[in-house]
Each structure stands twice: as C-alpha cells, then as structure tokens.
Image (spheres, rainbow, N blue to C red):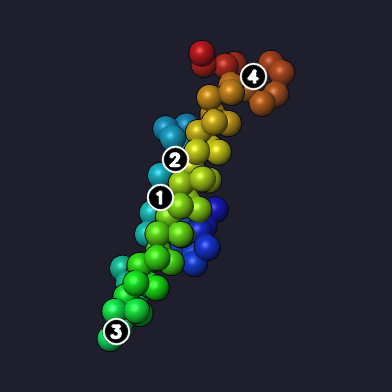
Amino acid sequence: MTGILGKFHVEHSVHGARVLARSFQLTSDCTENDQIDTAVQLLKDDLDACAREMKRLVAINQRGALFEGWPTEA
C-alpha cells in the first residue's frame, strides 16, 4: 500500500510492518513559505495514511491464523 502521494510504501512481513521512501526527492523546489508548508503537510498526510495501513496490518498479524488448521502464535 502506498500513501496518498505515492511517496512512501508500506511493507509487511512476519517481522512486522515498515515504511520505505520511494525516492530521495520528497518535495519539489519551494521558493515561498506557503509552498513549503503545503509540501510538508502533504508528506505528513501521506505518512498518516501509511501509519493507518501499518496499524491495520499489525492488527491482522495479532489476530492469529486466518485459516483453520494454520498454526497461531499466541
């Protein structure tokens, strides 16, 4: 899953969930304070979307096996 902008990507495995940046450049060139505020707010919103996805995936892991007969770790 990616965030709103696609700047970040959520990875999920048996070890947990993590966020990776898709590129080194996270904003365009900003020349005014309003542009900076907007760019940073969009990144914050993107990370918030990633955090929601991470929490959802961790909750699924904590529930245990999804199918009958699969082992659960409790």
Residue 71 coordinates in the image, percent (x, y)? 59, 16
Question: Which residue lies under the disc numbered 2?
Answer: 17
The residue under label 2 is which amino acid type? Ala
Residue 72 coordinates in the image, percent (x, y)? 57, 16
Which comes sooner in the sequence, label 3 or label 2? 2
The residue drawn where x is 49% and y is 67% is 5
Q: Relative to residue 36, is residue 9 drawn left or right?
A: right
Cα distance between the residues tagged 2 and 4: 21 Å
Label ID, residue 32: 3
Under circle 2, the secondary element is strand
The residue drawn where x is 38% and y is 72% is 39
Decide which of 66, 43 is in the foreground and name it.
Answer: 43
Question: Which residue lies under the disc numbered 4?
Answer: 70
- Mark 4 nearby-residue class (10 Å; few <14, some 14–19, many ≥20): few
Q: Relative to 32, does residue 36 appear above or below in the rendering?
A: above
Q: How many marks?
A: 4
Cα distance between the residues tagged 3 and 2: 36 Å
Q: Are marks 2 and 4 in contact (CB under 8 Å)?
A: no
The residue under label 3 is which amino acid type? Glu
The residue under label 1 is which amino acid type? Val
